[in-house]
Every structure is written in C-alpha cells, then in structure tokens.
C-alpha cells in the first residue's frame, strides 16, 4: 500500500473513531462450543491483512521510540516466553510478525495493535503474579489481533451508513492534511494504551477465546479468574484502565466461570 493510501486510510479511521456508539454492544457472556471456540478472524473486513500489518508495525515503532522500556529484564523475558508459548500452542507462528514489549509504566495496562504487536506495562505484573496470570492478559490481547477487532470495527462502521461525503473524498484520495496519524486512530495517547473501546461483543470474545488460548498452552485457566478478581477488587472505586471497556468485570468473570469445565478439560489434556 502506498504512503498516500496509508494516509488516506488513517484519516478515514480517525474520522470514524470520533463517532462513538456505532457498533452493536448487545452480546453478553457466551458458552464455548465447537462453533465459537476460535476467533471470528474479523468477519467482513474492508482492510487487507497486509495493510493492517503494515499499519500496526509503523505505529508500534512510534510507540517504542517515544515510550521507555522496562529496566527489569526479567519482565521482558517473561512476557516474551509467555507469548512464544501461546503462539506455538495455538499454531499462530506464521499468522503475524509477533512482537511484545514491556514498557516502564506503573499503570496496570496492556494493549494490542493490529498485526501482532502487544504492549505491556510494568504495572500489570502486580495483578498477574505469575506466568499463568500473564498468559490471561496476553491471550486476551492476542485475540484482539487474531480476530482483527480494530479493523473489523471500522469496517462495520463503514458499512453502517456512516461514510459522509467528506469521508468519501478521503477514500477517493482527498485532503491528506486530514491524516493525523494512527496514534489517534488506534487510541494510542499519552498513556500508550487503547483508549477507544472495543465493542462489548469483541471484549467478550477476547476474554472467552483468550482463556482458551492459555489452556491450550498449558497455563492454568483458573489463574485468569484470579487476575480478573484482583482487577475487580482494585477497581471498586476507580477501574484500572485495562478494564475500562464495555463489559462489567463481574460479567466477564461469569463468562469464564461458565466455560471453566471446557477450559480445564483442555488444560488437563496438555498435562497428560
């Protein structure tokens, strides 16, 4: 994709991102079945995978240039080890150019950019406690990537009658000055986190399939509940940024509990 086309796409996404409440948020907790045990892979998507990977790569490079990385090498090593294991166990080695970076930031946050890029803050480790807990967080972010939630959201908005004459001109190669960069498009602000919320449906899918990812990798799915409950306790007055999206923490916990028998069965099979 040429640079001008990237700018036009960035501008379009930025304009769409400024329109809240355009995606259905009707879904709630769901059981894992043979029909929903894997991500949707984005469903209908007007942005090609190649374009998505290029955009994510470019924006993650900006984040890494602007935000200091952790000084604790063991945290970076842990995050890389967990990601590698999750990717291998779920046969995702060739799906994306996976990359994970732990940033020096005490806020309990994690984020994903399209194309296999994941950022973790130092501050989240006090909630995850161990590799299994961290796998719950990383698995959740991986699903946002493999289900292509970011560009799926934009594609849904584009087909929902939202594209105005101004946006149409951008698609056709209009004013490049409208493009302010994908940092705003993907919600990467001063705290380097996904500010723009995913839909309720996407968050539940990331929770549901993320624990499946960790169970397949031999991480104890019970640890995911412990992580969520720590967040729930800490967020009784001011929810941590990582949990500021649509579903209430109690609903997310309930979904995981509903599916725990399936998760435990998969987990136990990895240990037999």
Image (spheres, helix red, strand yellow):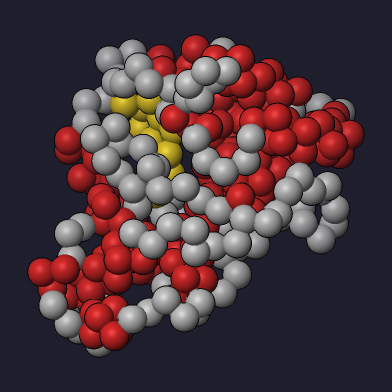
Q: Residue at x 16, y 68 (%)?
A: 178
Q: Position of residue 260 (x, y in %)?
A: 83, 33
Total tally of numbered discs in the picture? 0
Q: Looking at the image, can residue 130 be seen?
A: no
**Residue projecting furthest to the left:** 177
Q: Looking at the image, can residue 104 be seen?
A: yes
The answer to whether residue 127 is left or right of residue 158 is right
Q: In terms of depth relative to the viewer, which is nearer, 101 or 169?
A: 169
Q: In terms of depth relative to the viewer, which is nearer, 73 or 139?
A: 139
Q: Position of residue 92 (x, y in %)?
A: 57, 51
The answer to whether residue 14 is left or right of residue 260 is left
Q: Residue at x 23, y 46 (%)?
A: 61
Tell me if residue 245 comes above or below residue 223 in the rendering.
Answer: below
Point out the image quarter for the C terminus: top right
Q: Position of residue 67 (x, y in %)?
A: 22, 31
Task: Give the quadrant of residue 101.
Answer: top left
The answer to whether residue 192 is left or right of residue 32 is left
The answer to whether residue 104 is left or right of residue 206 is left
Point out the image quarter for the N terminus: bottom left
Task: Give the quadrant of residue 190.
Answer: top left
Q: Residue at x 47, y 47 (%)?
A: 197
Tell me if residue 132 comes above or below residue 246 in the rendering.
Answer: above
Tell me if residue 225 comes above or below residue 165 in the rendering.
Answer: above
Q: Residue at x 26, y 25 (%)?
A: 69
């Amino acid at each position: 994709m040429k640079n001008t086309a990237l700018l036009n796409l960035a501008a379009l996404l930025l304009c769409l991102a400024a329109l809240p409440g355009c995606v259905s948020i009707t879904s709630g907790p769901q059981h894992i079945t043979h029909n929903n045990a894997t991500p949707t892979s984005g469903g209908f998507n007007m942005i090609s995978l190649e374009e998505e990977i290029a955009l994510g790569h470019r924006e993650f490079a900006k984040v890494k240039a602007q935000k200091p990385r952790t000084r604790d090498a063991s945290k970076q090593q842990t995050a890389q080890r967990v990601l590698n294991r999750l990717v291998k166990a779920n046969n995702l080695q060739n799906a994306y150019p996976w990359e994970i970076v732990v940033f020096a930031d005490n806020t309990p946050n994690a984020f994903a950019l399209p194309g296999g890029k994941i950022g973790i803050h130092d501050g989240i480790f006090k909630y995850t406690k161990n590799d299994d807990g961290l796998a719950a967080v990383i698995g959740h972010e991986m699903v946002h990537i493999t289900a292509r939630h970011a560009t799926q959201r934009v594609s849904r908005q584009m087909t929902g009658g939202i594209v105005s004459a101004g946006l149409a001109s951008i698609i056709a190669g209009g004013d490049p000055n409208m493009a302010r960069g994908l940092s705003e498009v993907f919600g990467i602000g001063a705290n380097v986190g996904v500010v723009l919320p995913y839909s309720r449906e996407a968050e539940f899918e990331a929770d549901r399939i993320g624990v499946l990812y960790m169970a397949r990798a031999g991480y104890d799915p019970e640890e995911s509940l412990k992580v969520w409950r720590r967040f729930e306790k800490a967020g009784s007055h001011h929810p941590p940024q990582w949990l500021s999206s649509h579903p209430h923490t109690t609903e997310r916990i309930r979904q995981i509990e509903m599916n725990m028998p399936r998760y435990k069965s998969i987990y136990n099979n990895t240990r037999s």
